[in-house]
Amino acid sequence: MTIEFVAKQLFGYDSENSKESLGKKFAHISQGLLSFPLNIPGTIYHNCLKVISCKFRISAVFSQFFLNLKLKLLFFQSRNEVMDIMRTTLKERLASPDTYHGDFLEHALEDVNTEKFLTEDFILQIMFGLLFASSESTSMTLTLVFKFLSENPRVLGKLEVSKNN
């Protein structure tokens, strides 16, 4: 429900008249991002491994591999679908610039010609980030930031350089 409200404010998303549920897609994105491979009894990851290895009679190593692959594919598929929804809306807005919407996308598109850093792709990435931040708690979002920074030392280095300048 929150995600649909934020999507309406960002780019006029109408959840009642849309075939696709952004809430479900962001649930899949969260599952893909937040699946820490901890094989500890009681965790979702552990329970999924048990189901996969019992259902397909395969070893735990292959179960972990297939579960990780499935979650990653689900993440990328859902992310691409959300980006396609937003990209379609952006293209419709560019095709009919005289229609007033009063949302974030409209204001961002007005500034594309005056701000050098503001591109259509950048607007889409910002909107995706805002949608994600509205769908997850602050602590979970910060946890993901630290997780990705620890996995990408080059990005962390660039962040440190930009902070010091």
Image (cartoon, rainbow, N blue to C red):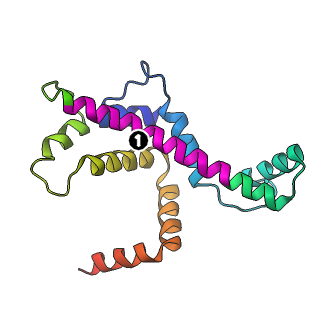
Q: Which residue is tagged 1?
A: 83
How packed mark 1 is, by other alpha carbons closer than 10 Å (few <14, some 14-19, many 20 or more), is some
Left or right: residue 146 versus residue 98 is right
Let me know if residue 101 appears in the view.
Answer: yes
Left or right: residue 13 versus residue 60 is left
Rendered image quadrant of residue 43:
bottom right
Query: Residue at left 50%, top 48%?
Result: 136
| Residue 50 image point, x, y percent | 84, 50
Query: Residue at left 59%, top 55%?
Result: 34
Question: Is 72 situated above or below 150?
Answer: above
Q: Which residues are magenta?
A: 69-94
| Residue 39 image point, x, y percent | 77, 61
Q: Residue 71 magenta-drawn?
A: yes
Furthest residue to the top? 17
Q: Quadrant of the C terminus?
A: bottom left
Amino acid type of the residue that numbered disc 1 sits on in the rendered structure: Met
For the residue pair 96 and 10, the one nearer the viewer reads as 96
| Residue 121 image point, x, y percent | 30, 49
For the residue pair 57 and 23, the one nearer the viewer reads as 57
Rendered image quadrant of residue 83:
top left
For the residue pair 56 and 51, the one nearer the viewer reads as 56
Question: Is 75 situated above or below 17?
Answer: below
| Residue 96 image point, x, y percent | 18, 26
| Residue at disc 1, secondary structure | helix
Magenta stretch prevailing secondary structure? helix
Query: Residue at left 80%, top 58%?
Result: 62
For the residue pair 121 and 134, the one nearer the viewer reads as 121
Q: Residue 56 magenta-drawn?
A: no
Query: Residue at left 18%, top 41%?
Result: 109
